[in-house]
Image (cartoon, helix red, strand yellow):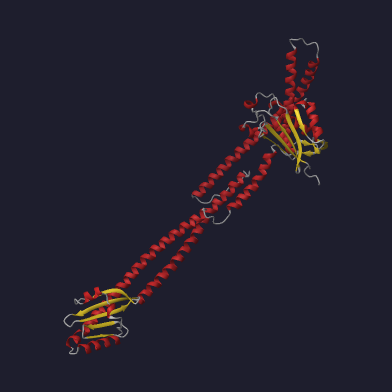
Amino acid sequence: MLRARPSKAAKAAKQRELPRRAERERKRHRRPLRLTGLRMRLLAAFAAVALLTSAAVTGVSYVLTRQSLMTRVNESSVQQFESTVNQYKQELDSADDTSTALADVAFNMQLAGRNGWVLYRDPTASATTTDSPPYEAVPAALRSQARKGVVAWQRSKVNGQPYLIVGSSLRHKGIEIYDFVSLQPQQEDLKRLAQNSAIASGVAIAISLALGLLASRGVLLPLRRLGIAARRLGAGKLDTRVEVRGNDEVADVSRTFNETADALERSIAELRSLEAASRRFVADVSHELRTPLTAMTAVTDMLEEATDVGDESAPAAQLIVAETRRLARLVEDLMEVSRFDAGTAELRREQADLVALVRGCLAARGWTGRVALNVPETLPVLVDQRRIDVIVANMVGNAVKHGGAGRVELAIGVLGPNLILQVRDHGPGIPSEALEHIFERFYKADKARGRSEGSGLGLSIAYENAHIHGGELSGGNHPDGGAVFTLRLPLQAPGENT
């Protein structure tokens, strides 16, 4: 003897599946650094701010440093140039041999470390220091300004090297003097500054990313806890709560979650209490009705067998008999439902011939002529014969009542580890809006099927009897029209050795 699982076996299986689904969801949500995740967006925002700030600071610093450096070089070079020109001006003015004087000035300048000078007197004499750039390297605009006797300067590249060229002239002597000041040291300093700024920017971005990780952890960790708690709550663990820390927005969300969970737990508890009370009420009413119904059934049996009932009283007597039997069936169905709800329904498995069970069920209810069978000669199974009879009776009875004038088709076969029992009618079929409700208690698709004399519990009881056997009962519409109900039962009982 086996004990049935609690009623609504499909719902129970779904409830067992919820924790596994929640665990899969939790693992899926733990994937690190998703490209569209909040953490990546926070890190990108921190990196962008650090990059923009570093670029702005570096750019401004580079421009100001370069400007300051070039200004100092210009001022110092121009001052030295003017000092040198004034120092040798009298010597060049008083010299009888200008060529010799120019050579002496160039030599003295070279000794003073002033390489790069060009001294020029067109066209008879000129002198330059060693390794100085050629006179042609002086830009034409600078020469034009220097010939006016003023001190002029211009930055220019000579042979790919940067120079500051400072020039002037002794107009009455026709002498032009130019100083080529190499800017290569300053260029190297600026290059090192740019490299150091890039390194500093990289360090700043790395620090900002580290701060972003810390900030995202502070935001995402409470959200992750909320997500885990929500999945646990969805899996049916109504006592799940989250710890509230601080007074920020995340803490407000956590408090709201806890309040919602409290309200949900109270509501579910109330619903379960009401459901349990309704089940007890149904069980108690069914039990209390059983005793008077037994007496009423005995009286109606005597009334049905009586021969002295007048013609006028006969219809009333028949109505009383029919309604009493219907009430008795309803009470039996309610008691069966209450046993399923209480988990006390008993399964008595016995070795039997399924084909013989089906034929006996049809014969007992007078449906043999209405049902076309497509069954094997014999099919031994280990089942509860009474419950299989209830399942088949409800499947075929539903097809006979609502299948129209056509014959009902019943087929039995084996598919893999399961046996399949299928009943099809040729009626209007099941309305699409009723498909998901056909196994609910007291549900009747009256608009589509016409008035039914049943209680609305037959298919629900058949559904529970299928699950108590470890199988399932499903219903739908056949592609060629009509409704079709399919019973799948395992050929091997649960726990039976192979």
Q: Quadrant of the N terminus?
A: top right
Q: Measured from the top left, where is residue 318 in percent x and y?
A: 75, 16
Q: Measured from the top left, where is residue 327 in percent x and y?
A: 72, 23
Residue sitting at x 79%, y 39%: 2
Q: Measured from the top left, where is residue 62 in percent x and y?
A: 36, 68
Q: Measured from the top left, where is residue 451 in percent x and y?
A: 66, 23
| Identity of the residue furthest to the front in this view | 480
Quarter where residue 337 is shown: top right
| Identity of the residue furthest to the left in this view | 172
Measured along the vertical axis of the image, is residue 40 above or below residue 390? below
Quarter where residue 303 is shown: top right
Residue sitting at x 60%, y 37%: 267
Q: How many marks?
A: 0
* Foreground pick, 373 / 282: 373
* Foreground pick, 309 / 339: 309
Measured along the vertical axis of the image, is residue 348 above or below residue 157? above
Residue sitting at x 55%, y 43%: 259
Measured along the vertical axis of the image, is residue 322 above or below residue 182? above
Relative horizontal placement of residue 212, taking residue 393 as reference (left or right): left
Quarter where residue 322 is shown: top right
Relative horizontal placement of residue 358, taking residue 77 as reference (left or right): right
